[in-house]
C-alpha cells in the first residue's frame, strides 16, 4: 500500500537532490566559457556582459558580486605559475614586468573561493598601481612569500594553496577584442621554504 508512494518519493528526492548537487558542482567548477589565458593569468572577458553564457550568469548570480561593465574592468586570476606548478604558500614567487594600460590596477592574494585572504597584522595583503615601487623603465618586481622582502612584497598565509587576482580598472583592454595581444607580468617560482 505504501510501497508505490514511497518509491515515488525516493525517486523524487534522488532526482532533485542529484540535480541540485550537479548544478552546484558545475557552478563551482567553472565561471563560464570563453576564457583567455595569457601566461599564468586567466580571464573571462564576457563574464560581466549581457552576452555571457548561462553558466556564467548563474555563477555570478550565485556569487552576488559587483560586476564591472564591458569597458570598466577585467579580472585576471592565476592559479599556477608560468611553469604550470600550483601556487602554494610554502614557496616564494616573483611577479615581474608590466600590466596592460589601466588607470588603476589591484593585486591581492585569494583563497580557493576567490575571496581575499584575511590580512595578517603588519603585513601587506594587497598592492595597487599607485603604491607599487617601479623600476626606471616603469616595470616592477613583486615578491610573494611568507617571509618579508625589501621592495614590493605580498604576504602569504602559513600554509595552503592560494591564487593571485589582478584587476585592471578603466582599461582599454577590458573592451578590446584583441585581448590575446596583451602583455601580462611574468609569474615565476623562485624557491620553496624559508630563506
Image (cartoon, rainbow, N blue to C red):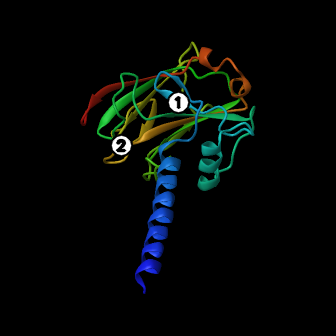
x, y percent for residue 61: 65, 53
Residue shown at the point (47%, 70%) measured from the top left? 13
Residue shown at the point (47%, 51%) measured from the top left? 25
Residue 42: which disc? 1
x, y percent for residue 52: 68, 38
Residue 161: which disc? 2
**192 relative to 83, above or below:** below
Instruction: Tell me if residue 115 can be seen.
Output: no
The answer to which of 137 and 168 lies nearer the viewer is 168
Which quadrant of the figure contains the C terminus? top left
x, y percent for residue 122: 44, 49
Under circle 2, the secondary element is loop
Instruction: Tell me if residue 97 can be seen.
Output: yes
Residue shown at the point (67%, 22%) measured from the top left? 101
Which quadrant of the figure contains the N terminus? bottom left
First in residue order: circle 2 vs circle 1: 1
Residue shown at the point (69%, 45%) measured from the top left? 67
**62 relative to 1, above or below:** above
Amino acid at each position: 500500500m505504501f510501497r508505490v508512494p514511497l518509491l515515488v518519493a525516493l525517486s523524487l528526492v534522488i532526482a532533485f537532490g542529484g540535480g541540485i548537487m550537479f548544478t552546484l558542482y558545475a557552478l563551482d567548477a567553472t565561471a563560464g566559457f570563453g576564457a583567455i589565458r595569457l601566461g599564468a593569468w586567466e580571464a573571462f572577458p564576457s563574464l560581466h556582459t549581457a552576452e555571457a553564457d548561462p553558466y556564467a550568469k548563474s555563477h555570478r548570480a550565485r556569487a552576488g558580486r559587483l560586476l564591472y561593465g564591458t569597458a570598466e574592468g577585467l579580472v585576471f586570476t592565476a592559479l599556477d605559475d608560468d611553469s604550470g606548478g600550483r601556487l602554494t604558500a610554502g614557496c616564494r614567487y616573483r611577479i615581474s614586468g608590466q600590466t596592460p594600460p589601466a588607470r588603476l590596477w589591484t593585486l591581492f592574494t585569494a583563497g580557493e573561493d576567490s575571496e581575499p585572504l584575511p590580512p595578517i597584522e603588519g603585513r601587506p595583503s594587497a598592492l595597487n598601481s599607485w603604491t607599487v615601487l617601479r623600476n626606471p623603465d616603469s616595470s616592477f618586481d613583486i615578491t610573494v612569500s611568507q617571509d618579508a622582502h625589501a621592495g614590493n612584497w605580498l604576504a602569504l598565509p602559513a600554509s595552503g594553496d592560494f591564487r593571485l587576482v589582478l584587476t585592471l580598472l578603466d582599461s582599454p583592454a577590458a573592451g578590446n577584442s584583441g585581448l590575446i595581444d596583451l602583455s601580462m607580468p611574468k609569474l615565476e617560482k623562485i624557491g620553496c621554504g624559508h630563506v
